């Protein structure tokens, strides 16, 4: 295919296409930096807290339940009621429930008689409870550097 382009006088990758890719890649890069996930220490008690608002206010009629999934997507907690605090709902996992490292997903389902809504969230458990943003940032920089070389590097024909 490359020989067809060369005989027609069209470079395989033109600068226009390369420059068009740059903003797209940069937006993807920034998006990955802005994703924040709660991070907890392995083998520790953790509180999962969610603010619940109905039409902008905390309703006294709302009941919330949670289902929590291990990183391998098996169920850790199956639709258990959350505890109402002043402005949020809470569910506590004990240290024996947090011994698996990885990205957990949990669903919060809230009802108030007429409203029934479920939202999904994530949290991360690792050895020290440190957010993995530094490693993610370095990986993103490496990827951006590779794409930069592809976009603006020399053409080898």
Image (cartoon, rainbow, N blue to C red):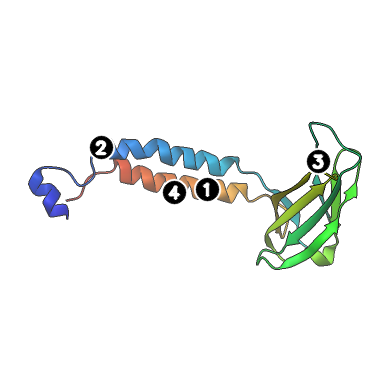
CA separation in Å, label 2 and label 1: 27 Å
Other-residue count near label 4 (Cα within 10 Å), few / some / many at <14 / 14–19 / ≥20: some
Q: Is residue 70 left or right of residue 134?
A: right
Other-residue count near label 2 (Cα within 10 Å), few / some / many at <14 / 14–19 / ≥20: few
Residue 127 versus residue 53 in the image, above or below = below
Identify residue for label 4: 143
Identify residue for label 1: 138
Residue 102, percent from left and from top: 67, 61
CA separation in Å, label 3 and label 4: 38 Å
CA separation in Å, label 2 and label 4: 20 Å
Other-residue count near label 3 (Cα within 10 Å), few / some / many at <14 / 14–19 / ≥20: some
The residue drawn where x is 47% and y is 38% is 27
Identify residue for label 2: 15
The residue drawn where x is 85% and y is 42% is 88
- The numbered mark, 2 or 4, whose residue comes first in the sequence reads 2
Q: Is mark 3 on a helix, strand or loop?
A: loop
- Asked whether the beta carbons under mark 1 and mark 4 sit within 8 Å of each other, the answer is no
- The numbered mark, 1 or 4, whose residue comes first in the sequence reads 1
Identify residue for label 3: 52
CA separation in Å, label 3 and label 1: 35 Å
Q: Nearer the viewer, mark 2 or mark 3?
A: 3
Q: Which of marks 3 and 1 is in front?
A: 3
């Amino acid at each position: 295919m490359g020989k067809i382009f060369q005989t027609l006088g069209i470079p395989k990758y033109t600068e226009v296409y390369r420059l068009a890719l740059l903003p797209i890649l940069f937006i993807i890069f920034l998006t990955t930096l802005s994703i924040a996930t709660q991070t907890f220490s392995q083998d520790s008690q953790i509180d999962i807290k969610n603010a619940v608002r109905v039409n902008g206010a905390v309703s006294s009629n709302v009941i919330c339940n949670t289902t929590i999934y291990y990183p391998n997507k098996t169920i850790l907690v199956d639709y258990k009621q959350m505890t109402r605090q002043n402005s949020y709902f809470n569910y506590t996992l004990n240290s024996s429930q947090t011994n698996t490292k990885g990205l957990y997903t949990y669903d919060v389902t809230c009802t108030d008689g007429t409203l029934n809504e479920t939202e999904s969230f994530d949290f991360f458990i690792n050895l020290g409870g440190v957010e993995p943003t530094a490693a993610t940032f370095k990986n993103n920089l490496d990827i951006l550097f590779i794409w930069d070389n592809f976009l603006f590097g020399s053409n080898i024909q």
